[in-house]
Image (cartoon, rainbow, N blue to C red):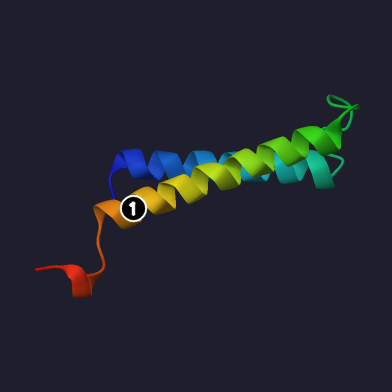
Amino acid sequence: MGARQILALAMSGIYLVAGVLIGFTDVVKDVVPNYRPGIAAALIGYGLLRFVLWWRRQKQVDPAPENRP
């Protein structure tokens, strides 16, 4: 796994963790008092989208062992 793939996975994780922290804890309640559920949903959704796109790209680049010549 190259540095680019690690960075893509890390960014997905960062978005997911940030969304969970904003949405389900009181960690940044003082900084983001309004619209927390919407911001959390957007961050979690974007993190999941990035992960799914990374996963699909990995499946295209690295075919299953039975399909290899």
Quarter where residue 38 is shown: top right
* Along the line of sight, the residue nearer the viewer: 56 or 9: 56
Rendered residue at 83%/47% (across/down):
24
Label 1 sits on residue: 58
Residue 2 in the image: x percent, y percent? 28, 45
Residue 19 horizontal/vertical position (percent): 71, 41
The residue located at (84%, 24%) in the rendering is 31
Q: In the image, 28: left or right of 68? A: right
Q: Is residue 33 above or below residue 60?
A: above
In which quarter of the view is residue 37 placed? top right
> Which amino acid, by three-letter code, is at mark 1?
Gln
Between 65 and 36, the one nearer to me in the picture: 65
- Look at 15% across and 68% down and name the residue there: 68
Residue at image coords 25%, 62%: 63
Give the quarter of the figure containing the C terminus.
bottom left
Q: Label 1, secondary structure: give it.
A: helix
Provide residue 26's location: percent of width, then percent of height.
87, 40
Other residues around mark 1 within 10 Å, as few (<14) / some (14–19) / many (≥20): few
Horizontal relation, residue 63 to residue 48: left or right: left
* Residue 36 location (% of width, % of height): 84, 34
- Answer above or below: position of 47 versus 33: below
